[in-house]
Image (cartoon, rainbow, N blue to C red):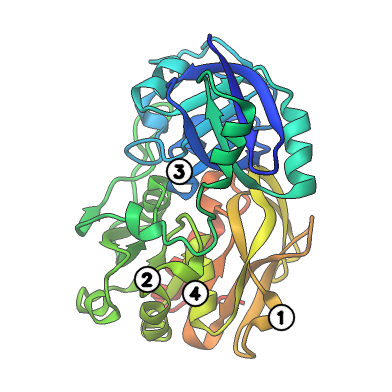
Amino acid sequence: MKPAVLALADGTTFEGRAFGALEPTQGEVVFNTSMTGYQEILTDPSYVGQIVTMAAPQIGNVGTNPRDDESARPHATGLVIRELSAPSNYRSEQALPEWLARWKVGGLEGIDTRRLVRHLRTHGSQNGVISAEAVSLKALVDRARQVPSMEGLDLATGVSTREPYQWTTPTPALFGPQPPLPAHRFHVVAIDYGLKKAMLQFLVDEGCRVTVVPASTKAEQVLALSPDGIFLTNGPGDPAAVQGAQATVAALIGKRPLFGICLGHQILARALGAKTYKMKFGHRGANQPVHDLSTGRVEITSQNHGFAVDAKSLPASARVTHVNLNDQTLEGLSVPEARCFSVQHHPEASPGPHDARPLFRRFVDLMAGTALPS
């Protein structure tokens, strides 16, 4: 491995070894506290333009395989880890370094990731550069300072599908034959802001057929597809910057049952008149405790977001349904009269492992007219 450096925009540097693609890479440096799931994380479109630091010390032992991809390719620009492990899992088809090199994603290993995570927690997520070039540390820091800020970037439109498509594939069975699925009782239109395929699979598991449409699709075009419900997906970047999304969702509220996740949650909140803001270092990991105010339960959730909804800016028609127990930030809302609700976390990611999965059933119950979100 070649010596390489991670340089942050505030002048802090970390020296380690390059793996994966050896070309310089840049982006917003963030951290994820998950112990597993690095392939799912790297292929999550919500990580567009970001260098992901894994807090767990050993990464790579699961290897990679196409079944664990959340989208067609990695979207993170880089990966930073403490120690690279050789694959030892029977499902592995390609080692992590070769997989990263194939997709031109840069990696850095051998640094003190505890120090880096503490630095990002204290000073906030910031832009950085990974490079194995023979250039000065000052030059790399200067390059990091020129990386565009996430705030104000419309990244969702760039990763959204270009053409509508149908999805009827359920969650694959890990062992044994595929269990029987309910009939496709409902037609859901999913507005793609950078979706993970697991969301679509969960909707199919609940008896839905899904039409996925681009982020730029207008409200009248969505309604022309005669959906029983509308799903707002996750995605990257600043919710305030997604072109046309706020107006489109505002025109859809009350027309059909509506369910939003992550960026979709933030866009729904803005369509209701609320404000969003960039967090200091965001929530990224599979161990975020969330209090469901309607049931009183505490759910362990998977999260990946750097922006949040300002709860104080919600209109009187909206109810707070979920709260993050680490920092009391807004994790969910509903407008019962309009048959819409949303959550900031990822119920399809199964960290609990299934604590938040009933949210998909709640959406189906809304479409069936048998329940309202609290």
Query: Does residue 57 appear in the picture of this structure?
Result: yes
Residue plotted at (63% across, 28% down)? 137
**Is 230 placed above or below 112 here?**
below
Q: Position of residue 46 (x, y in %)?
A: 48, 50
| Residue 31 occupies quadrant | top right
Assess disc 4: are there few (<14), some (14-19) or many (≥20) residues with their C-alpha within 10 Å of its C-alpha. many
N-term-proximal mark, 1 vs 2: 2
Amino acid type of the residue tagged 4 in the rendering: Leu
According to the image, label 4 marks what residue? 268
Q: Kindly check if marks 1 and 3 are in contact, taking CB atoms under 8 A apart as contact.
A: no
**Would residue 227 be found to the left or right of residue 75 on screen?**
left
Q: Nearer the viewer, residue 13 or 221?
A: 13
Mark 4 or mark 2, earlier in chain = 2
Asked if labels 2 and 3 touch by Cβ distance under 8 angstroms, the answer is no
The amino acid type, in three-letter code, at marker 3 is Asp
Q: Which mark is residue 243?
A: 2
Residue depicted at 50% across the width and 62% down the height: 263
Q: Residue at x 46, y 13 (%)?
A: 90
Q: Which residue is mark 3?
A: 44
Callouts 3 and 4 close, C-beta under 8 Å = no
- Tag 1's secondary structure? helix
Q: Secondary structure at mark 3?
A: loop
Label 3 and label 4: CA atoms lie apart by 21 Å
Name the spot of residue 157 as percent of width and height, x first: 34, 60
Answer with left or right where residue 152 lies relative to residue 179: right
